[in-house]
Image: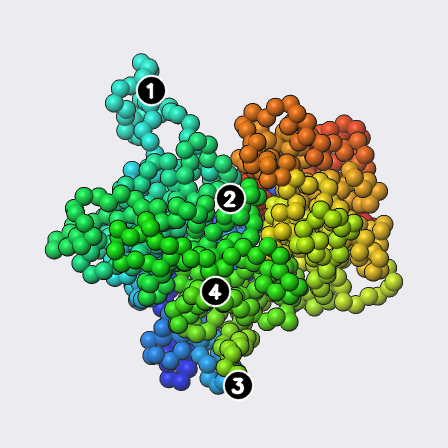
């Protein structure tokens, strides 16, 4: 039996007003063997070379890597070293606050991550700090000296009191899922849940739901259903009764094909609801949920002593086909309540105050609204708040302006189905200049409440930035509490009583921790003061710091060109673009410009730090990041102006933005490149066809080049209809489009302009992409090459739509930098 190795940082002590600092839990680590890896690609050879002495002047001349010449290889060598420095910057992912043992200040635990290029994974770490406010207007974070890597950990979830910590480890094969329950100084329980009970636990941020009950004896969570039984065969044919997995004289067949939820969920089984008793390790599946319902985001309903406990969760129905759900908020969903399973330790002496011993059927709590997710109960249990994407569901747009709702929670179970839904924040159609544009957020804290019990703290998109909002869910009052005079983007990490721990960054500033405090003014109106955190642990190398200090950014408002009478007020308002440039101009010549285009199209690129884009800025490019009409953060009217007009309105907005910076003398017409992924790739390939003399080079990641081809192969064929036809496309969607629809799809596609293309173009494609299958990009690339175009294609065999695996992301942006340099000299 192996010994469990842990690190306790109690010896890393800081005396803060006689309060001994130590993290709330010891941190489990895994013993590791140092292994010399054999490099298998160009950039891994560069990584290995950086760890060894330079012996480039000795030895025989080696064969040039495929696709490179001597000049390009030198560019690779130079740029890859800098890209490595950007890649090594840590992300600040999550944070938790715990009460200090001595009652003075708070303990904080931060989850950070970093690309591990050699292992081709993200390295997850935990670092702790003690927070104290020594004087008014200052805050002190006393950090542990080093972060500790959490090897093999899928997620960690503290209990409500902060006295226990769940550490969950999902298997990478057919091994059991591991549940570890940690106390303040040791591992208290460990349970291995075999695949026969359920598969890996969902930790994807969408179906994901891991929730402790109030007395911290039960944990509800979402995991893959156990694998269904499959037919068994041997040398005599079909074997009745099956066989064990270890029977070498037989093999398992495939059985019936099962639908999944598309991109990133390929091969994953149906998400189902389970509860584990942390005293006994017993696991029970929650009964009463229909097989057609995929579940997620589970929370415990407020409980009454002596009565059964209930769970509230989100359910997505899939009676027919499961359409892709990643980034698609237009999938109808509802909140449901169901009775939690009873365990033997609870059953004795339990009074069933809410009815009989029979199982209570599942209750749909939101049957009168087409979308409901992210359920959160108030601290006193008096109301349930949830988010809705009904604008997306009702229009068919994959993402749109959201709304916030409240249910005053009845204590009588029988009243749940008829509970009234109160609108807290409605969908904002068109905001006045400088005013709240509507809700746009993709996550919410598990405990988002200030001590008053009715104010939520959330992060939301506001134009081209992300801001922090306070929302009074009783009055509906919405306040922007991150600095209104800042173009930086802000994200709330956790709450420390009445205070906020947040992260702030910009395109030219790496993420930094900020601490928000309420300041009472003379007129009694609360304001927020944001304090810098002392001795920040989150830094970049001196070289990166120097390069970023030479850059600046601004958010531009771009007037809409040729406003027609048919446009709504919101669609006629200026859209925005983020412009990143050098802050010191050595000559009258402008740096080459890269036009950056987001996907979606109903997405947004915000003014936060991006390592990849900061790298491109640092090698001598200005960036024009265009949030064309249809982007999130500008109101529903502007967003809904785009469906039915893709390939024209969005293309014209981008060309207008380019002309805007040219007219201001910020860009040279002869040195413009363009980069986009997904729908951004759709725009990129449209632009080089519709404006063939405008761009000297282009690069695309998994682009939509031919909607007529995509509609029969993608996990979201309904997207093709809505974006090509507008809202009416939602009602004409079919799996077998007739010829006239295919003709319109082709006419809306970049491939219809292929004959005019002159621009050299780089394709970066993920072979496992279910959203825009690799055939889409390859068809366009082959057709362009057939007519003599300059094309380079790199396919990443194990990547999906996002091309997010560390090595693939590294290689793709390295190639983008080299490709643009080649044509911008």
Closer to viewer: mark 2 or mark 1: 2
User: Is 318 situated left or right of 138 in this image?
Assistant: left
Is residue 389 shown above or below 144?
above
Q: In this view, which residue lies farthest toward the left?
A: 349
Is residue 549 shown above or below 208?
below
Residue position for label 3? 522
Q: Position of residue 38 (x, y in %)?
A: 55, 44
Label drawn at residue 393: 2
What SS does tag 2 mark?
Answer: helix
Q: Position of residue 520 (x, y in %)?
A: 50, 82
Residue position for label 4? 476
Calculate the distance from the C-alpha at mark 4 to the C-alpha at mark 2: 23 Å
* Mark 2 or 3, nearer chain start: 2
* Mark 4 or 1, nearer chain start: 1
Query: To which quarter of the image does residue 752 belong?
Result: top right
* Picture residue at 76% right of the left edge, 67% below the top: 583
Calculate the distance from the C-alpha at mark 4 to the C-alpha at mark 1: 62 Å
Calculate the distance from the C-alpha at mark 3 to the C-alpha at mark 4: 24 Å
Q: Position of residue 325 (x, y in %)?
A: 49, 42
Residue position for label 1? 233
Neighbours of disc 4 within 10 Å: few (<14), some (14-19), many (20+): some
What SS does tag 3 mark?
Answer: loop
């Amino acid at each position: 039996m192996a010994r469990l190795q842990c690190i306790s940082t109690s010896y890393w002590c800081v005396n803060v007003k006689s309060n001994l600092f130590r993290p709330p839990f010891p941190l489990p680590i895994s013993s590791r063997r140092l292994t010399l890896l054999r490099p298998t690609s160009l950039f891994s050879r560069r990584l290995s070379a950086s760890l060894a002495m330079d012996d480039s002047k000795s030895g025989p001349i080696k064969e040039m890597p495929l696709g490179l010449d001597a000049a390009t290889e030198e560019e690779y060598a130079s740029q890859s070293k800098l890209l490595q420095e950007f890649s090594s910057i840590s992300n600040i992912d999550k944070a938790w606050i715990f009460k200090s043992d001595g009652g003075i200040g708070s303990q904080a635990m931060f989850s950070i991550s970093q690309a591990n290029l050699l292992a081709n994974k993200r390295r997850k770490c935990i670092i702790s700090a003690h927070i104290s406010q020594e004087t008014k207007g200052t805050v002190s974070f006393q950090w542990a000296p080093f972060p500790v890597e959490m090897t093999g950990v899928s997620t960690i979830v503290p209990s409500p009191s902060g006295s226990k910590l769940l550490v969950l480890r999902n298997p990478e094969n057919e091994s059991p899922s591991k549940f570890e329950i940690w106390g303040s100084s040791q591992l208290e329980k460990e349970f291995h849940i075999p695949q026969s009970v359920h598969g890996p636990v969902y930790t994807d941020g969408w179906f994901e739901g891991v929730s402790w009950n109030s007395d911290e004896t039960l944990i509800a969570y979402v995991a893959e259903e156990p694998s269904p039984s499959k037919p068994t065969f041997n040398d005599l044919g079909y074997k009745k009764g099956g066989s064990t997995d270890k029977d070498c004289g037989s093999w398992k067949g495939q059985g019936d094909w099962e639908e999944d939820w598309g991109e990133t969920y390929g091969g994953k089984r149906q998400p189902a609801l389970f509860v584990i008793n942390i005293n006994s390790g017993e696991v029970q599946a929650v009964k009463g949920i229909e097989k057609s319902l995929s579940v997620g985001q589970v929370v415990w309903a407020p409980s009454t002593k002596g009565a059964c406990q209930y769970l509230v969760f989100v359910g997505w129905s899939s009676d027919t086909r499961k359409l892709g759900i990643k980034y698609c908020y237009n999938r109808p969903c509802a909140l449901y309540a169901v009775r939690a399973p009873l365990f033997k330790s609870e059953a004795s002496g339990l009074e069933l105050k809410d009815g009989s011993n029979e199982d209570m059927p599942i209750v749909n709590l939101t049957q009168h609204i087409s979308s409901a997710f992210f359920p959160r109960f108030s601290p006193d249990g008096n109301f349930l708040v949830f988010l809705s994407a009904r604008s997306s569901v009702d229009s068919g747009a994959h993402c749109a302006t959201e709304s916030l709702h409240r249910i005053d929670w009845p204590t009588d179970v029988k009243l749940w189905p008829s509970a009234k839904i109160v609108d807290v924040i409605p969908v904002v159609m068109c905001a006045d200049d400088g005013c709240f544009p509507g809700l746009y957020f993709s996550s919410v804290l598990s405990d988002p409440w200030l001590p008053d019990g009715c104010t939520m703290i959330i992060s939301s998109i506001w134009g081209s930035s992300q801001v922090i909002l306070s929302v009074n869910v009783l009055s509906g009052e919405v306040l922007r509490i991150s600095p209104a005079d800042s173009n930086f983007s802000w994200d709330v990490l956790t709450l420390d009583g009445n205070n906020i721990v947040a992260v702030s960054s910009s395109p030219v500033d790496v993420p930094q921790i900020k601490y928000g405090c309420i300041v009472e003014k003379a007129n009694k109106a609360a304001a927020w003061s944001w304090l810098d955190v002392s001795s920040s642990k989150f830094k970049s190398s001196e070289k990166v710091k120097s390069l970023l200090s030479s850059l600046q950014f601004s958010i531009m408002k771009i007037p809409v060109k040729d406003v027609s009478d048919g446009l709504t007020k919101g669609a006629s308002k200026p859209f925005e673009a983020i412009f990143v440039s050098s802050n010191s101009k050595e000559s009258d010549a402008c740096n080459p410009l890269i036009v950056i285009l987001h996907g979606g199209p109903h997405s947004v690129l915000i003014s936060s730090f991006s390592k990849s884009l900061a790298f491109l800025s640092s090698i001598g490019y200005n960036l024009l990041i265009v949030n064309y009409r249809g982007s999130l953060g500008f109101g529903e009217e502007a967003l809904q102006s785009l469906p039915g007009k893709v390939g024209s309105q969005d293309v014209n907005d981008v060309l207008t933005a380019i002309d805007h910076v040219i007219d201001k003398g910020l860009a040279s017409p002869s040195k413009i490149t363009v980069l986009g992924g997904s729908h951004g790739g759709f725009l990129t390939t449209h632009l080089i066809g519709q404006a063939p003399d405008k761009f000297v080079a282009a690069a695309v990641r998994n682009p939509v080049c031919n909607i007529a081809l995509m509609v029969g192969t993608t996990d979201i064929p309904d997207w093709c209809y809505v974006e090509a036809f507008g809202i009416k496309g939602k009602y004409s969607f079919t799996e077998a489009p007739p010829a006239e629809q295919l003709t319109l799809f082709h006419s809306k596609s970049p491939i219809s302009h292929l004959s005019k293309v002159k621009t050299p173009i780089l394709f970066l494609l993920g072979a496992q992409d279910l959203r825009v299958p690799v055939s889409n990009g390859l068809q366009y690339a082959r057709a362009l090459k057939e007519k003599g175009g300059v094309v380079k294609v790199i396919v990443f065999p194990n990547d999906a739509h996002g091309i997010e695996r560390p090595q693939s992301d590294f290689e793709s942006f390295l190639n983008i930098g080299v490709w643009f340099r080649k044509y911008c000299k």
